Structure formats: C-alpha cells, structure tokens
C-alpha cells in the first residue's frame, strides 16, 4: 500500500499540473504578453513531449530498472517545475515545460509497471488500479480551486511550487521503500521509430497552432505538412519491418484496440479544448478572478470525480459499451449546449454544459484501456495500454492546437465581448460536439460481436509469431 501511495503521488503532481495550469493561463498571458498561440504552446509543449516519450520511457524502465527510471523522472520533473516558476519569458517557460514533460514521461507508465509487479493477485491489482484512477478524479476536482487560490493570492508562478514538496517526498520514499524490478525479456530500443513519431506529432501540432498567423499557403506551414507526411510514411514502412517495433501495427487489426485509440484521442481532445475555452471565457470575458473561475468549473470536476469510479464498476460488470455510449452522448450534448444554445450567455445553460461534460469525461476514461487490451494476449496487454496512454496525450495536444487555432482565427487581437467570444468559439464547440459523437459511434461499433472477433484474430497473430520479420531475418 505504501508503494501504491508513492506511485499515486507521482500521478497526482503530473495530473494536477495540467489542471492547475489552465486556470493560470490568463494571468500568464498578461504578465508574459503572450498571444493565444503562445498560451497553446505552454500546454502543447508539455503534452507533445510526453506523448512522444511515453513508450520509450516504459521500455527503458523494463530494460535498466523501473525504480531507477522512476527516480530519474521525479528528479527531472521536480527540478524543471522549479525552473518553470522562475521563467523570465514565454520562450523559457515553454522550454522548461518540455523538460518537465521528459520527467513526466518517466513517471506514469513506469509507476503503473511498478504497481503491476507489486500487486500480483488479480483482485488486489484491480483495487490498486482503481485507486490509481481515482487520483485523476481528485486532481480534476482540486486543480481548478487550488490553482485559482494560488494565482489569486500569490501569482501564477506559485502553481509550480506544489510539485516541489510532493516530488521530493516521493523521491525519498522511493529510495527507501520501492523495490527494483526489470522485465525478464525487455523490448529492444527503436530510436528511428521514436524520431519518426516525434516528427509526425511535432510537425502536425506546429502547423495547426501557427496557421492562423502564418496562413495555409505559408512555406513554413507547407514544410511542416511535408515533414509530417514523410515521417508518417516512414513510420508505417519502417515499423512493419522491425522484429520489435515501437508501435506494432498488428495491434490495429483489432477493432476494439483501434477504436480505443481513436476514442482516447477524441475524448482528451475534447477535454483539453473544453478547459482551454472555458478558462479564457471565465476570466477574459466574464472578468472573474482565477479563484472564482476555478469554483465555476467545480460542477464539471465534481461529476468527473463521481462518475469515474462508477464507470470502472460498470466496465467490470457490463463491459465497456454502456460507459462509452453514455460518455459519447453526454459529451456531444455538452458541446451542443454551447454550439446551438449559446450556453455562455445563460448561467443555467452554462451549468448544464459543465455537468454534462463532467459526466461524459468521467465515464469515458475507464473503458479506454479495457477496450484497448480486450482479447489481447496477456504478454501484449502492457504495450496495448501504453499506446492507449499515448493516444490520450496526443488527443490533449491536438485539442488545444485545433481549438486554439479556431478561436485565434475568430478573435483577432484577443479582446472581445461576450457576443464576440460566443461567435468566435461556436466552430470550436461544434468540433467538441463532433468528438463526443465519434466516441458514441465508435463505442457502439468497436464493442460488439464483430469487433471482438477481430480482437481474437489479432491475438492469434501474436501467438503465431513473436514479431514482424525484417528482410534480413527472412
């Protein structure tokens, strides 16, 4: 239980860091004289690096020792948090956020491996993972209020101070109590695949964020599109030929796995876009303080905290389909409240939109990993879960990039009235509605009898061969 508590401490600081940061965005924007795209980069610089390195960190921990990598992650994350609090400009803040993500990539996937190896009995492991998932709900509920209180009383730099005592305590406890463990047969490193993944994610996100300012016909944007396309083509070609690829393309022959991957992207794109829009709206348009803005978002966070564990129990008893269908319907309905009925203009509608989104997001997280590993051999479950976790971060990056780009193209200089914000944000709310609808449809299609059959077929492929053959081994 002490090991579980230590691992949950790492998850808390990583999860709390994201929710707290959103509340601080308007204050950071004013002090650092940043544009909307600048605010996007303070979030996406972190999520991009995190998404790119999650699988590398997990395989490295399996090879050289999970406790060793976990300790390194705590050190890097804690030190970089201190550097973020002292950033003299936006560019330095973005750079320190990227360093922070390097540390964060060594925490969550490695902590999950430590928990899996500590709790060997299935029921105990299930309870431990349930506690682990509950920490995300706690961070969602506490983040806006804690962030608002700190920003209003001390300033935005203080949001990074939270990580220092928690990170230091987790490090000391890890050294004393967490046992070292390694995988009996660790996967080989794949540096080429890793670079190609970074090329795809980085180029796509940069192009989306910078397009409102540079224009679609800008040589820079066209170059980014070319880099992304070439990196994706190279990744698909190269990974098919490796014995132990970074991303095994055979996973995608399973409809539940492919569906879970897309659902994770859509759900977390909706979340990041939702938080980004509402933070700017509550403080820049309604003129609320950071603390009051955090309190206004409590209905969403509270619903997430309540429905996340309920979804876990529902998945255990009824499978992932009911949770995914209800989640998609609730998230789509929340988007419609703002896209069709101008929810920002009326407090009851605003409250309804927040509650609906909190219910939807609370329901969607638990079935993602369950659906990803559905029907897979136990030996491949960890890798499948890692891809699902990476998809969550990719969705977070794309959500901020796309929603921010749509908002930036509609608001011009960034100073607008309630009516101006409503008009500028309406396309963004339609995107969030579309993401919720995609969760609903994919939840229906990828959890049925046909989908389970494709998962069994994919599992047979892994049992027949340990991995794709290269031309040399053939």
Image: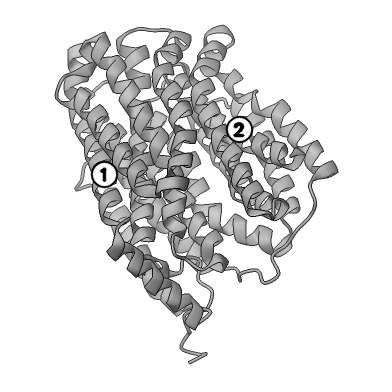
Look at the picture and state if 203 lies above or below 147: below
Query: In the figure, is residue 353 to the left or right of 315?
Result: left
Query: In the figure, is residue 182 to the left or right of 162?
Result: right
62 and 421: which one is in front? Answer: 62
Query: In the figure, is residue 298 to the left or right of 424?
Result: right
Position of residue 316 measured from the top left corner of the image (x, y, whole percent): 47, 47
The quadrant holding residue 348 is top left
Q: Judging from the image, what secondary structure is the residue with disc 1 in?
A: helix
**Mark 1 — residue?**
440
Q: Most extreme residue toward the left, as rendered? A: 340
322 and 70: which one is in front? Answer: 322
295 and 69: which one is in front? Answer: 295
Q: What is the C-alpha distance between the residues marked 2 and 1?
A: 29 Å
Q: Label 1: few (<14), some or many (≥20) within 10 Å?
A: many
Residue at 31% in and 26% down: 356
Task: Tell how many labels.
Answer: 2
Look at the picture and state if 275 lies above or below 11: above
Residue at 40% in and 18% down: 299
The answer to whether marks 2 and 1 mark residues whose Cβ atoms lie closer than 8 Å is no
Q: Most extreme residue toward the right, as rendered? A: 176
**Mark 2 — residue?**
12
Look at the picture and state if 88 lies above or below 469: above
Position of residue 314 measured from the top left corner of the image (x, y, whole percent): 43, 41
Q: Is residue 248 visible?
A: yes
Q: Is residue 234 visible?
A: no
Residue at 45% in and 56% down: 198
Position of residue 350 measured from the top left corner of the image (x, y, whole percent): 28, 16
């Amino acid at each position: 239980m002490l090991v579980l508590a230590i691992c949950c401490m790492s998850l808390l600081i990583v999860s709390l860091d994201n929710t707290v940061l959103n509340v601080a965005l308007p204050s950071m924007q004013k002090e650092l004289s940043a544009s909307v795209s600048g605010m996007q980069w303070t979030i996406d610089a972190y999520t991009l690096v995190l998404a790119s390195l999650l699988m590398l960190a997990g395989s490295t921990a399996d090879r050289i020792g999970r406790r060793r990598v976990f300790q390194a992650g705590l050190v890097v994350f804690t030190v970089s948090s201190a550097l973020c609090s002292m950033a003299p400009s936006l560019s330095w803040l973005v750079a320190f956020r990227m360093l922070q993500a390097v540390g964060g990539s060594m925490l969550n996937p490695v902590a999950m491996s430590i928990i899996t190896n500590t709790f060997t009995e299935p029921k105990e492991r299930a309870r431990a993972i349930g506690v682990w998932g509950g920490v995300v709900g706690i961070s969602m509920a506490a983040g806006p209020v804690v962030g608002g209180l700190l920003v209003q009383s001390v300033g935005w730099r203080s949001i990074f101070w939270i990580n220092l005592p928690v990170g230091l305590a987790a490090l000391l406890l890890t050294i004393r109590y967490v046992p070292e463990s390694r995988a009996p047969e660790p996967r080989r490193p794949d540096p080429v695949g890793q670079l190609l993944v970074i090329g795809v994610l980085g180029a796509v996100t940069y192009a989306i964020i910078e397009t409102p300012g540079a224009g679609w016909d800008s040589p820079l944007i066209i170059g980014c599109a070319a880099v992304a396309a070439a990196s994706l083509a190279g990744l698909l070609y190269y990974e098919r030929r490796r014995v132990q690829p970074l991303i095994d393309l055979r996973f995608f022959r399973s409809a539940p796995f492919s569906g879970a991957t897309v659902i994770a992207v859509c759900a977390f794109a909706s979340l990041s876009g939702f938080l980004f829009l509402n933070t700017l709206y509550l403080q820049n348009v309604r003129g609320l303080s950071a603390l009051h803005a955090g309190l206004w978002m409590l209905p969403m966070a509270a619903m997430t905290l309540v429905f996340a564990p309920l979804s876990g129990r529902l998945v255990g008893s009824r499978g992932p389909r009911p949770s995914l269908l209800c989640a998609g319907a609730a998230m789509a309905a929340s988007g419609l409240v703002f896209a069709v009925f101008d929810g920002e203009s009326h407090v009851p509608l605003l409250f309804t939109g927040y509650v609906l989104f909190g219910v939807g997001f609370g329901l969607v997280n638990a079935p993602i990993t369950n659906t990803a590993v559905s029907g897979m051999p136990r030996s491949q479950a960890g890798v499948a879960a890692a891809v699902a976790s990476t998809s969550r971060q990719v969705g977070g990056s794309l959500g901020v990039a796309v929603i921010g780009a749509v908002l930036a193209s509609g608001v011009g200089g960034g100073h607008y009235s309630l009516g101006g914000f409503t008009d500028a944000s309406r396309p963004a709310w339609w995107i969030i509605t579309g993401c919720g609808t995609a969760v609903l449809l994919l939840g229906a299609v990828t959890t049925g009898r046909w989908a389970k059959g494709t998962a069994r077929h994919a599992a047979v492929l892994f049992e027949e061969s340990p991995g794709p053959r290269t031309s040399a081994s053939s």
